Amino acid sequence: MNVFYVLNGKKLKHYLIMMLAAVFTVGVIYAERGNITVFKADEGPAAIYKVDTDQKVLALTFDISWGETRAEPIIDVLQQKGVKKATFFLSAPWSEAHPDIVKKIIDAGYEIGSHGHKHDNYSQMTDEEIRKQIRTAHTVLSQVTGKPPTLLRLPNGDFDKRVLKIANELGYKTIQWDTDSKDWTNPGVDRIVSTVVSRAHPGDIVLMHASDSVKQTHEALPAIIDELRAKGYSFATVTELISGTDVKGNKAQEQQKNPPTSTAPAPSTT
């Protein structure tokens, strides 16, 4: 009788160990599933501010949403200085109204991205309105430039998770900036030059403007180019910059909570 209970005790211990092991395994699998799910959910589309690179290369970018007097002088400076790579983010209404300037940007070999349609904060729009704005701009820019844009810089740099997700679904990379020239405040040529040159770094995306509200950018640009070159920098389009490099983005930021004031204001009609 005693032997019977000893054997049962050994079997019971064995079964208990097997059950604990099974429970542990199921727990690990469940935990791993949870981790994977959380990881995937957290890995949403990111707004790109800069890239990781050891090379002294950066992207000069220019937003245009209104006006007709500042864009061409800036294009002229870039060409005179032999800068063959730059990216212009154009609003759809401005592009429709100024196809001749758009053509000049294209003929110079510069990249064109979308700056949306209405110059409003997209984070304040419904999902349907966000899609409408991005699609409308896409159609217009594709027709005016002859090439569908794939980069999007949102008006005022304003976005939230919904905007990033919808832009990504529509095939766009959302581009922000890591160095803000603050040229839209017209602080003086020397100040603009100092701001850009002192903050620029490898893999940087530099924000400037070519709308009529900026009155000093075309005057500051020659010194910016010269001083950056003196530091060993070369220039690339945004697409070239982010290709084949690790993108530094901002996944979950509710950008509208701290709306940037760096994008040149546009009339309410655009």
Image (spheres, rainbow, N blue to C red):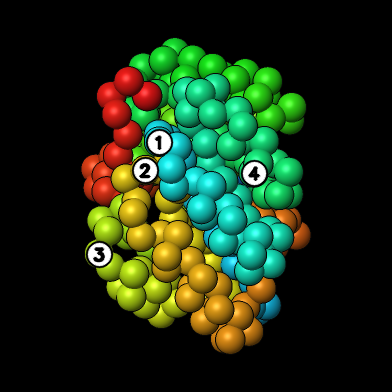
Please, what secondary structure does the residue beneath circle 1 have?
Answer: loop
Which residue occupies the foreground of this view, 247 or 264? 264
Q: In the rendered image, which residue does mark 4 sit on?
A: 105
The answer for how far apart the CA atoms under marks 4 and 1 are is 15 Å
Q: Is mark 3 on a helix, strand or loop?
A: loop
Q: Please give the residue where the numbered disc 2 appears in the rendered image.
A: 212
Q: Give me the disc on residue 67.
A: 1
Q: Which residue is tagged 3?
A: 187
Q: Is 255 situated left or right of 136 in this image? A: left
First along the sequence among labels 3 and 2: 3
CA gap between label 3 and label 2 equals: 15 Å
Q: Tell me the residue at 73%/43% (across/down).
A: 107
User: Going from the N terminus, do you reach mark 4 or mark 3 first?
Assistant: 4
| Residue displayed at 45% across by 37% down | 68
At label 1, the amino acid type is Gly
- Looking at the rendered structure, the secondary structure element under dot 2 is loop
Mark 2 Cα shell of 10 Å, populated few (<14), some (14-19), many (≥20): some
Q: Foreground mark, 1 or 3?
A: 1
Give the image location of residue 71, x and y in percent.
49, 46
